[in-house]
Image: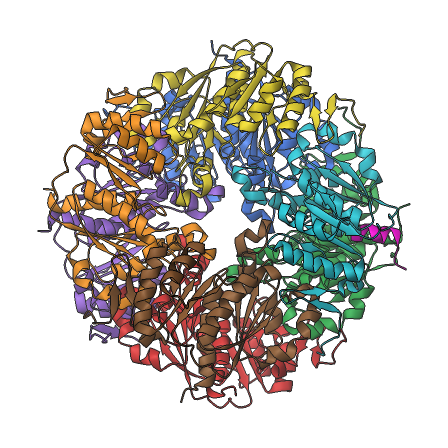
Chain colours: A cyan, B blue, C yellow, D green, E purple, F orange, G red, H brown
Amino acid sequence: MKAPLAPLAELGFAQVDLDRARRKGFPEVVYGAGKSPDQVVRIATALFRAHGRVLITRIDAAHVRAVRKHFRTAVHHATARCLCIERKPLPRRSGTIAILCAGTSDLPVAEEAAVTAEFMGNRVDRIVDVGVAGLHRLIRRLPDLRKATVLVVVAGMEGALPSVVAGLVDRPVIAVPTSIGYGASFGGLAALLGMLNSCGTGVTVVNIDNGFGAGYAASQINALATVPST
Amino acid sequence: MKAPLAPLAELGFAQVDLDRARRKGFPEVVYGAGKSPDQVVRIATALFRAHGRVLITRIDAAHVRAVRKHFRTAVHHATARCLCIERKPLPRRSGTIAILCAGTSDLPVAEEAAVTAEFMGNRVDRIVDVGVAGLHRLIRRLPDLRKATVLVVVAGMEGALPSVVAGLVDRPVIAVPTSIGYGASFGGLAALLGMLNSCGTGVTVVNIDNGFGAGYAASQINALATVPST
Amino acid sequence: MKAPLAPLAELGFAQVDLDRARRKGFPEVVYGAGKSPDQVVRIATALFRAHGRVLITRIDAAHVRAVRKHFRTAVHHATARCLCIERKPLPRRSGTIAILCAGTSDLPVAEEAAVTAEFMGNRVDRIVDVGVAGLHRLIRRLPDLRKATVLVVVAGMEGALPSVVAGLVDRPVIAVPTSIGYGASFGGLAALLGMLNSCGTGVTVVNIDNGFGAGYAASQINALATVPST
Amino acid sequence: MKAPLAPLAELGFAQVDLDRARRKGFPEVVYGAGKSPDQVVRIATALFRAHGRVLITRIDAAHVRAVRKHFRTAVHHATARCLCIERKPLPRRSGTIAILCAGTSDLPVAEEAAVTAEFMGNRVDRIVDVGVAGLHRLIRRLPDLRKATVLVVVAGMEGALPSVVAGLVDRPVIAVPTSIGYGASFGGLAALLGMLNSCGTGVTVVNIDNGFGAGYAASQINALATVPST
Amino acid sequence: MKAPLAPLAELGFAQVDLDRARRKGFPEVVYGAGKSPDQVVRIATALFRAHGRVLITRIDAAHVRAVRKHFRTAVHHATARCLCIERKPLPRRSGTIAILCAGTSDLPVAEEAAVTAEFMGNRVDRIVDVGVAGLHRLIRRLPDLRKATVLVVVAGMEGALPSVVAGLVDRPVIAVPTSIGYGASFGGLAALLGMLNSCGTGVTVVNIDNGFGAGYAASQINALATVPST
Amino acid sequence: MKAPLAPLAELGFAQVDLDRARRKGFPEVVYGAGKSPDQVVRIATALFRAHGRVLITRIDAAHVRAVRKHFRTAVHHATARCLCIERKPLPRRSGTIAILCAGTSDLPVAEEAAVTAEFMGNRVDRIVDVGVAGLHRLIRRLPDLRKATVLVVVAGMEGALPSVVAGLVDRPVIAVPTSIGYGASFGGLAALLGMLNSCGTGVTVVNIDNGFGAGYAASQINALATVPST
Amino acid sequence: MKAPLAPLAELGFAQVDLDRARRKGFPEVVYGAGKSPDQVVRIATALFRAHGRVLITRIDAAHVRAVRKHFRTAVHHATARCLCIERKPLPRRSGTIAILCAGTSDLPVAEEAAVTAEFMGNRVDRIVDVGVAGLHRLIRRLPDLRKATVLVVVAGMEGALPSVVAGLVDRPVIAVPTSIGYGASFGGLAALLGMLNSCGTGVTVVNIDNGFGAGYAASQINALATVPST
Amino acid sequence: MKAPLAPLAELGFAQVDLDRARRKGFPEVVYGAGKSPDQVVRIATALFRAHGRVLITRIDAAHVRAVRKHFRTAVHHATARCLCIERKPLPRRSGTIAILCAGTSDLPVAEEAAVTAEFMGNRVDRIVDVGVAGLHRLIRRLPDLRKATVLVVVAGMEGALPSVVAGLVDRPVIAVPTSIGYGASFGGLAALLGMLNSCGTGVTVVNIDNGFGAGYAASQINALATVPST
């Protein structure tokens, strides 16, 4: 296998993949947790230079301070724990991504999905606190659910919401288990297993608390709906 | 602590607790699995002599043959895997126990609960195949759910049904996870964890596939509704 | 399925279910953990307006300060980590709920169950430190156990107490595993598994440390004993 | 909530959801495992009457015999363990679903996905035995990967293939862990965890061995590409 | 470290440790499971030649046939799944080992402990079916419990019996979890964790179903009571 | 069962079991973790009044300060995290308990065992840092191992030391897994499983980090060696 | 990345990697389990044509019959469950691979390692039944251990043998956990965790029962010793 | 077995194994975590006296301060969390150890491996941030991979990198799972299981985050390549 000459930024501690935008349709995203503020700034700089837009997830206060010093226009989404840097926003696609969450405590994960999807050029419809213990809160939003191209459903505890939603709509449902819960929730394991065993058809699942992954996959799917293959 | 002189039948391999009917309001029940047909018959004989009624659960074909040879009137509930022997049935209590199951494959566990509850003198309302992927099947039975004194809800896979049911009724819900499922259901673990983490209030849980335990507890609760404490 | 017009309070981050009192016989309860003090106050305000009573569980010091600023008469149960706000207490039902705990360290969970049950209008009999390593401490309370309509049994470590109690009484036993223990207790898993596998009949189980859930279910059951079905 | 009058077929042991085609765009699918041959036939009959097409998954030899007696034209896909009954096939959509599998032993799961997707009206491109231990087998198929609208990637053991594939394409990747492996594969758990933790963006996951679920979700996504939202 | 010249029998597939009787006070014991009948016979022959006594555990029918062909006087304990071969029995020690089991299904494990202890020269007092759901069955045997030098307590399901027993006696309690149970017993894990977390002091634990290990350790302890150190 | 009139101290939050010394041969021991300093002092006071000796384990600095204010002569064992209060020490028994630990980090658990055993009237021989990676460190202590009546073997990581020790001596070995390790040690689980599966005969196991339990059981066994049964 | 033109045999159900011998120094090995006899024969045929040698592992009787029909000279290693086909054996390397196993039941896994290593051109020294419960059996073989270039250590149950061996030699130790054991061995998990947490330096680990992987890695290491890098 | 007179330093809390350099070819290494700074200094002193070189791993700031006070020339590797003390460095061996890591967050573990290998006299080639989501970053380093005698591959999350690397080279691959990840990574369990189930031949695995162990084993293997056996 010949070594291809793909562009990358060699930073010593990282090789930033500058080819990803070409291969994947969107530049590399920076996962902040476990990286020093300085490392995050240097990776962001390389990406911004190449693509004019950077998304940084799982940030803490030190990351925010360091990034803002270098990127005055960086937008900090506090609940979502994300930083968005861009020269100008992407144009919005036509379809809508519905992002539901079962409870108030699931909001940070849902917001990470929403910020990701919006930064990637999608319209997002947030539908919060529609857990299955009070079905009428969900049912009254049925028209909104059915309007969406794809649905991201975020829930902790028993993670039952995706099953119920998948029974009501004919679009793909991406289920995001959260670590909300205690005792036998085992850090989100209960919700994860529940979603993997969902009796609802068309449900796929991402890692516990992985709002970013769900928002990214939803954006990929929504892109298909607006730019159909031939 | 003085050794009490409680009645028991000493069989060598077992000490049948003949005092249980006095203490617990219902005689000892025989758990067939892991006992030889001969052991089951001898325990059943001791219990029948003392109480005139025996319930045997988790039986196989050899148990059925052996028991029926000794107790001609024993009734075999094939789906529930139970044998019921009684001189005459108990009078039926007034309230109703609703027993729901999410799918067809959960029927054996639901039937074990139903046979147990009926044998203990309760009326049972069976509501089958009402999984959350098709909510209308459940919603159309709402009047029946609300009429019940206590509800037993049996489900495998993600075990979401008890959460939804508990959101609709004001009576106790006993959740029974089943081992129905595959892969990450891990023999019913997913359903069990889901039910333990239920966002529905008033849900309590029994062991995986423990239809008997659910039927028994439901009977105890129903008994309270008909014979109120003072 | 038509969207019903059930009452709810739309707060942006939450949709407070104001219909729950009608459906469930008791208003929505606020789970404090993971919510900001401000969110708790706003949810409590909506609930208090609609129902005149609010129960808040799993609170920390910041919650207490914020809530008390708005609700001067809020009662703080420190061991139980609960706040109770009510215009006037509910009348007490006739039957008694016995709440047992195996050790001193299980008290916070037992108190959460007790405060919940009392707030819902029940008489509670607290029986503390009756672990199975000193059976006489339990046996001398046998008359109290047998007087109760329903029993909540709280235990950590090996979680053996519910099995022993269920062998002594003919009323429903709700078992609450706690995270008390170390090493192979795995955060309450040992007690949870022990209770799910209880050889005692009539035992149902709630999540680890879920005193609230046990108190709620016990109240539902006790309500049946005082208002029998017909 | 009013009980809707949705169509269903009440069979005693099952309530066949005849409304699902309307809500979900495809009729209910029959999961054969755990159902008797007779139950499968009766459910299939109700579905065929209503929709003219039935998919039955996880079948054994007895199911095949029973179904073929009633439906002479039923097609048995042996590797996929599926039965397909239809008056006439659905028209094929334009886009292609690529279905990759890492090894020969993963074929039954991959075929379940392929048969499902084809039965739902999609073109499928099968790419077999492209595990990461011999990357060139995968790389030479790169043009095929990039032509697909959506990719289903089936792998057991360490489940690394979806990560590699997701790094090469800009379309949604649905990862299917299989139970192929031994020892610390723990029945597919290793592959499942690997896929959930994938460093590849745009990867979502279904249950272990759930080829059907992956094929179904892929079909939903492919449908979006051919019928774009407005 | 110099290689010692300890006696052993080199059989090709095994090196039988003929020095163990000197080091450990009792010859090597043969674990039958996973060995062919021929391997068992050849190991037994080497041990019998050296020590005049052999204990073989976890045997199946083929082992029994093969061993009896070579050792006409071998005694087969069917419930315990053991074979005992000895020129003449060891003299019995003075103290007694009490072996309790919670239920009838635990008998095979309890018998393995009993046969082991008896073969090693101890008196055994069997106390069966004394599970904690009917405490009076245990309490009436209190004098026997208190007479024992050491107690082996065998239980499946929630494994609560050792805690209760340890609260009643001042002698060492060896707890043996069994794989009896279903669902969340997870093959004896629940009982094992229960016993490891026992609130009873003086409880030590062996592997699930390891009756042999418990009998062996009990014999070692009982030996101390009859031959005190100086 | 009649309620016995056993002595206990009713403290509201605890019922101190003053009968335990009679039943168990040693008074109740106070487990400090999870109890407030005030609770510990009050329980210790009740026990000291009745028995003249108190052992408190798993203490923190606040416990030490509070207890010492009330009991000037309390001895604080810092490594063992224990407090010992006694009017006068028990006379020492003749036999010796050997307490081995595999590594320096296991010392706190080994010391908890040693302090417990000494406080209960036993001679202790400490043998530290004899892990199996350098067998000669263990082998040179062989004479000390063989002199002991009973051996407590403390080890973290893979927990192999008890197996090796049990192969060298003919006395009971009590294995104590510790939470020392990282990664796949899973908080001591690896060591615990290793010890439960020990190929060494005569090994019994206590909970992870349970030095107290091992010291207690060793003392019970050593007591048998000096006061033989008749 | 350009698609390389590496040689492979396209069989429809498999793409046999004919380039592996060049990349890896040894041809692809066939894992028999889960493949039909016919599939195994066809893959073996493609490999034999290209390389003149084929190793097939994890075979059953049907594989043996089918392969021998096509390859008359195939050698069946029954204990190792392997088939070896070769035109002529590879020349033997100078160094020796020592393969130890703890017990007789571990022999199949040890033999799989030995057959693999021999087929790859290595000398193997088998050292059986040297479990740590009788250290002298191991110590007397010390000279053989120290002569080996690399050691494969196979053990089930607590998996302690690699730690002890690694403490005695200065060569790489490859540890192979086996599924031998019962109860809390959890199918080899205990041995696996023990080996991963080994206090012995220079120990690396392969999957449970993966004798092939250990033999392969040992051969790679041994090859380095005979053909040193420059 | 006679007690050998092997040299060791008896420090009370530790027996430093001064014989290890002879047996293992390298002196004992100090694992800092869980030891007090004073203990580390005293062990280091004993080792330095005997061997003139000490490696200390898993250190914190207090260890660094204490050690540097005694050893002015100690070198602190901050990312690797190691301290190296030596009179003069070992001569470098000829072959190269390649140490790869999948992501920036894996650097501390990779550096622990690198520092260990260098301190033991090896040349190290660091290849960072070559995760499988951007294969070209890895492929362009293929010549470096193929030059190495042995490869250490460090990865968290799904741990797929070792499988890909093992498919490209014919040298031993030592896989190091890291605890980098979240949710269903379960502290590195996902990466560990992935590596144990690797489809790549010649992969062996060490404990999660065990950079030291991998560096040590790699050094042992590299030593074989430069000093071939005869």
Q: In this view, does D131 lie to the left or right of B16?
A: right
Q: Give the answer, above or below, for where E25 lies relative to B47.
A: below
Which is nearer the eye, E108 or G227?
G227
Q: Which quarter of the figure has residue B25?
A: top left
Which is nearer the eye, E42 or F19?
F19
Percent x, y of residue B207: 50, 37
Answer whether residue A222 is magenta in the image. Answer: yes
Residue that appears at 22% across and 27% down = F19
Q: In this view, does H55 lie to the left or right of A18?
A: left
Residue that appears at 29% across and 77% down = G141
Q: Which quarter of the figure has residue G28?
A: bottom right
Q: Is residue F116 left or right of residue B95?
A: left
Q: Give the answer, above or below, for where G85 lies relative to C74.
A: below
Percent x, y of residue B64: 47, 39
Magenta residue span? A220-230
Residue A111 in view: yes
Percent x, y of residue D125: 79, 64
Q: Quadrant of the N terminus of chain H?
A: bottom left
Q: Main secondary structure of the magenta part?
A: helix
